[in-house]
């Protein structure tokens, strides 16, 4: 099978690694990719958000499967273009990707499908916003309606700040505050059947103890020793399947990865958000644990054959990933700095996010530079491996959290 992977982050490096490990994959191509992906795939320099450029490349290399990593190409209609030339694609159409691209669309789908989520109002005017804020009270949750790369949500006790965010965005979803730990649970869907993956937890704030600004994600771990045993089944039945059915009913079948961000509240699980693609950095802990061959799984989803798919198999090992970020991330990341000391030690994997090669040197090129995943017999061992490897990397001004999976590792059996 010839596979073309679209994207250039650490998530795509993790996808590339697992695709490459599938014995059925004879050729792996990536566009645009990054230096880490370039070690295991042929790279093609194209604009990943250009539907024609991607479909033309897929034809040129004779791709049997295209896998789309990030949300921007999905929202731009890249999956539609690939399917229209008859090539199976793992990634939803532009219409179905609205589940991530538009918060109000997601809310509408959940309401029709009876999926548990926070109560909310979609507001366009200051008057509507004030009414919604006052009906829920503090803490206030105000979400930009469009794609905002993780920066569109304000959660605050400050009513004036909540209102100011609403006015700045124009159209917002204002909703009830959900209390309780958050988990990420991904469903692989062929448009009809959906298979839940094991849950993971990510760390969104930039500093230890969940302090500082919201980021794209500073680390993650899986499995979750504290999660209810039935969480996968419950999420499939109450969240993933009803959502997939509702989208199919509206003639926008969701073929790809449906990411459910869930809050485990005292009143049960609630959807905080949907994404239309694999999470980053959750993918960097999930895929190293997944034993089911990835290319065959994603091909089955892309061709409507998930019903015949045997249950996913998972390694018993735990995984922890720690993200090395650039100085100034997330507000003002400083790039172009040399990265040295990268060496995968046993049971670790280093996934490139924002890196580039220039003059034979590896330089940072983005806010999140590397995701360093450690595997171990439990979270404590996986953490130790990840932190040992990341401590050997040098990047001027680079920073990472020291507490990824710390609390969970202390709640493990025998800890
Ligand atoms: P989102 O972009 O929807 O994932 O929101 C980003 C973050 O804001 C989430 O991961 C939560 O930590 C927080 N958040 C979003 N919605 C709510 C809510 N209704 N209640 C509490 N926190 C929320
Ligand atoms: N880890 C959060 C996200 O991928 O959106």
Image (cartoon, rainbow, N blue to C red):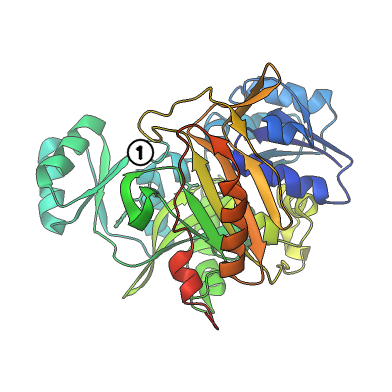
Residue drawn at 18 percent across, 56 percent down: 139
Quadrant in the picture for residue 103: top left
Q: Nearer the viewer, residue 190 or 206?
A: 206
Quadrant for the N terminus in the image: top right
Quadrant in the picture for residue 11: top right
The residue carrying mark 1 is: 151
Q: Which of 294 and 234 is in front in this view?
A: 294
Instruction: Give the left or right position of residue 135, taking residue 86 as reference.
Output: left
Q: Which of 156 and 137 is in front in this view?
A: 156
Rendered position, 29 above or below 183? above
Position of residue 170 measured from the top left corner of the image (x, y, whole percent)? 24, 32
Rendered position, 220 above or below 217? below
* Circle 1: element type: loop
Residue drawn at 26 percent across, 40 percent down: 172
Instruction: Give the left or right position of residue 214, taking residue 101 as reference.
Output: left
Position of residue 136 measured from the top left corner of the image (x, y, whole percent)? 16, 58
Q: Is residue 41 visible?
A: yes
User: Is the CB atom of the residue marked by disc 1 within 8 angstroms of ligand 1's nearest atom?
Assistant: no
Position of residue 272 measured from the top left corner of the image (x, y, whole percent)? 38, 56
Position of residue 220 measured from the top left corner of the image (x, y, whole percent)? 52, 56
- The local crowd at label 1, few if under 14, some if 14 to 19, many if 20 or more residues have their Cα within 10 Å, is some
Instruction: Give the left or right position of residue 286, taking residue 176 as reference.
Output: right
Q: How many labels does the image show?
A: 1
Instruction: Give the left or right position of residue 295, taking residue 132 as reference.
Output: right
Quadrant in the picture for residue 361: top right
Q: Is residue 256 visible?
A: no
Residue drawn at 55 percent across, 64 percent down: 199
Q: Which residue lies furthest to the bottom in this view?
A: 414
């Amino acid at each position: 099978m010839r596979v073309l992977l679209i994207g250039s982050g650490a998530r795509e490096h993790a996808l590339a690694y697992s695709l490459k490990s599938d014995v059925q994959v004879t050729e792996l191509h990536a566009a645009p990719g990054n230096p880490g992906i370039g070690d295991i795939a042929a790279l093609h320099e194209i604009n990943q958000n250009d539907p024609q450029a991607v479909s033309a490349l897929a034809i040129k290399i004779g791709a049997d499967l295209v896998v789309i990593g990030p949300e921007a190409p999905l929202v731009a209609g890249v999956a539609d273009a690939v399917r229209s030339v008859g090539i199976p694609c793992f990634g939803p159409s532009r219409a179905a990707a609205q589940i991530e691209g538009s918060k109000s669309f997601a809310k509408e789908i959940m309401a029709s499908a009876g999926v548990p989520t926070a109560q909310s109002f979609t507001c366009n005017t200051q008057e509507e916003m004030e009414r919604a804020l006052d009906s829920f009270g503090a803490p206030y949750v105000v979400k930009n309606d469009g794609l905002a790369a993780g920066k569109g949500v304000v959660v605050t006790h400050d009513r004036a700040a909540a209102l100011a965010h609403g006015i700045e965005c124009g159209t917002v979803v204002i909703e009830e505050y959900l209390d309780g730990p958050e988990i990420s649970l991904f469903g692989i869907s062929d448009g009809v059947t959906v298979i839940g993956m094991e849950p993971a937890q990510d760390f969104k704030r930039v500093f230890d103890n969940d302090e500082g600004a919201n980021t794209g994600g500073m680390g993650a771990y899986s499995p979750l020793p504290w999660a209810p045993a039935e969480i996968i089944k419950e999420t499939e039945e109450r969240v993933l399947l009803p959502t997939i059915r509702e989208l199919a009913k509206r003639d926008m079948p969701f073929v790809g990865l449906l990411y459910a961000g869930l809050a485990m509240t005292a009143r049960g699980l609630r959807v905080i958000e949907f994404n239309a693609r694999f999470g980053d950095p959750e993918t960097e802990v999930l895929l190293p644990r997944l034993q089911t061959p990835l290319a065959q799984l994603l091909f089955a989803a892309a061709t409507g054959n998930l019903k015949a798919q045997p249950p996913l198999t998972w390694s018993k090992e735990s995984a922890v990933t720690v993200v090395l970020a650039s100085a100034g991330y997330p507000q003002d990341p400083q790039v172009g700095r040399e990265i040295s000391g990268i060496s995968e030690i046993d049971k670790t994997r280093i996934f490139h996010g924002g890196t580039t090669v220039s003059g034979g040197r590896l330089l940072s090129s983005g806010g999140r530079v590397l995701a360093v995943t450690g595997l171990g017999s439990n979270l404590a061992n996986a953490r130790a491996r990840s932190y040992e490897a990341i401590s050997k990397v040098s990047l001027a001004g680079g920073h990472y959290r020291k507490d990824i999976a710390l609390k969970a590792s202390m709640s493990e059996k025998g800890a």
